[in-house]
């Protein structure tokens, strides 16, 4: 009898937890983002964009799913820019908060391990910003809103070859960062395909917590490359570029989408003016819905939104579209997560503020990349767009 009593208590507890996601006709979405740690501006941008979207929808009565209206509740969990914290954050959102889907993590270093957790626990996850293929590879519950590094790498190779007339390249990257390491290796392979073996004259590594890069930069400068490729986070870029200039480097840098934070110019200043990087959208000169998003964000938060803010907007809208496409919610979290996953997988094309995108079977978008130049005003100015063939 005692065993039956405790079994019934457990059932009641589980049913109570499951119903939490729908208490008061509310839909819970989790956000696994870096609000502290090395790249807090990335987490801030994601949260700000999400809050703006949530306010838009809730002010109109909520999200309509079938014939019902649901208020949105967004739960923000700080992953501290750490892989292990991203795993813990994912588990909390899945088990404690019983969210229907998770937005983030953004950085591949956190998105890859968190993606495994979400896939294992059959919870839809969409990363706004992660470009490493391993985030979604063989994970049917994991999606993304960003292009992939196997596409971004050749974009950087071709642009630098053309713009700088470069034949010799140097690369500097964080060995303990999946994004930085993966993109560096792709770039090296693609560069040497184009310019021959040995044309990457320096391939230097560092650890993410490093502050002094003089040893690596001295080696790079002595190798006499035509430019330096930095597939690194904005906070590290600012230090590396400044120290390179202090050591006498006068050549160009080519960056990747992790440069694209609104905080870059606050940290880097004039040292980054005139440099180029590949990214997901260009704020300067934007039109239509993209310009409307930028203007509203700037008016609300006081600065121009970076690519991660725009990508979070798109990623969240994708999840909300999937919920609506599902047509109804059953009230059972596990069943509804499956409905949302299936609906996400069925989205064939999406018109986002970072551009039009089509999705492949892996849950990855096929979309264009943008090259921007950092202007004297510190703006990220559109230079060219490169689209998949």
Image: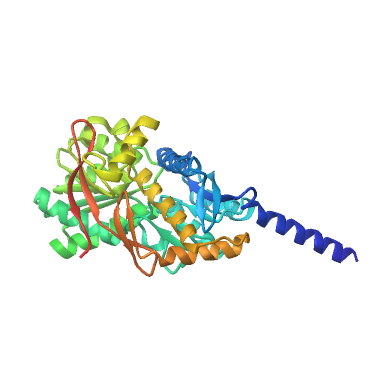
The answer to whether 33 appears left or right of 178 in the picture is right
* Vertical relation: 362 (above or below) 104: below
Total of numbered circles in the picture?
Answer: 0
Residue 13 figure quarter: bottom right
Q: Could you say where residue 266 lies in the image, as x and y percent from the top left? A: 31, 31
Farthest right residue?
A: 1
Q: Could you say where residue 191 lies in the image, as x and y percent from the top left? A: 19, 59
Position of the C terminus by quadrant? bottom left
* Vertical relation: 137 (above or below) 144: below
In the image, 338 versus 384, the foreground residue is 338
Farthest front residue?
A: 67
Farthest left residue?
A: 165
In the image, 359 versus 322, the foreground residue is 322
**Would residue 259 be visible to someone looking at this image?**
yes
Position of the N terminus by quadrant? bottom right
* Vertical relation: 267 (above or below) 66: above
Residue 201 figure quarter: bottom left
**How are the residues colored?**
rainbow
Q: Could you say where residue 74 lies in the image, as x and y percent from the top left? A: 53, 45
Q: Residue at x 36, y 36 (%)?
A: 297
The answer to whether 54 appears left or right of 215 in the picture is right
* Vertical relation: 261 (above or below) 189: above
Q: Residue at x 76, y 58 (%)?
A: 12
In the image, 298 versus 77, the foreground residue is 298
The answer to whether 28 appears left or right of 389 in the picture is right
**Would residue 168 be visible to someone looking at this image?**
no
Q: Could you say where residue 289 lies in the image, as x and y percent from the top left? A: 30, 45
In the image, 29 versus 7, the foreground residue is 29
Residue 188 figure quarter: bottom left
């Amino acid at each position: 009898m005692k065993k039956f009593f405790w079994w019934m208590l457990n059932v009641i507890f589980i049913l109570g937890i499951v119903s939490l996601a729908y208490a008061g006709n509310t839909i819970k979405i989790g956000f696994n983002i870096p609000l502290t740690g090395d790249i807090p501006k990335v987490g801030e941008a994601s949260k700000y964009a999400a809050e703006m979207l949530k306010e838009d929808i809730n002010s109109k009565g909520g999200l309509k799913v079938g014939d019902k209206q649901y208020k949105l509740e967004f739960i923000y969990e700080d992953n501290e820019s750490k892989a292990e914290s991203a795993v813990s954050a994912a588990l909390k959102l899945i088990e404690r908060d019983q969210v229907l889907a998770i937005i983030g993590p953004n950085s591949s270093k956190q998105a890859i391990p968190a993606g495994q957790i979400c896939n294992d626990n059959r919870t839809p996850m969409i990363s706004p910003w992660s470009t490493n293929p391993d985030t979604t590879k063989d994970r049917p519950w994991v999606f993304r809103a960003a292009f992939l590094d196997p596409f971004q790498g050749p974009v950087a190779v071709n642009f630098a070859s053309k713009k700088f007339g470069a034949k010799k390249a140097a690369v500097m990257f964080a060995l303990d960062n999946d994004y930085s390491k993966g993109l560096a290796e792709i770039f090296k392979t693609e560069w040497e395909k184009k310019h021959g073996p040995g044309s990457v004259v320096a391939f230097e590594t560092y650890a993410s917590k490093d502050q002094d890069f003089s040893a690596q930069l001295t080696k790079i400068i002595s190798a006499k490359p035509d430019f330096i490729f930095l597939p690194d986070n904005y906070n590290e870029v600012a230090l590396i570029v400044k120290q390179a200039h202090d050591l006498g480097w006068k050549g160009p840098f080519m960056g990747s989408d992790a440069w694209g934070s609104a905080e870059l110019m606050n940290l880097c200043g004039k040292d980054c003016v005139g440099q180029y990087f590949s990214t997901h959208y260009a704020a300067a000169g934007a039109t239509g819905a993209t310009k409307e998003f930028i203007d509203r964000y700037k008016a609300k938060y006081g600065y121009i939104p970076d690519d991660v803010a725009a990508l979070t907007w798109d990623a969240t809208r994708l999840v909300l579209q999937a919920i609506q496409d599902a047509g109804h919610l059953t009230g059972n979290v596990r069943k509804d997560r499956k409905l949302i996953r299936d609906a996400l997988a069925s989205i064939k094309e999406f018109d986002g503020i970072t551009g039009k995108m089509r999705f492949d079977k892996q849950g990855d978008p096929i979309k264009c990349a943008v090259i921007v130049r950092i202007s004297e005003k510190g703006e990220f100015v559109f230079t060219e767009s490169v689209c998949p063939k």
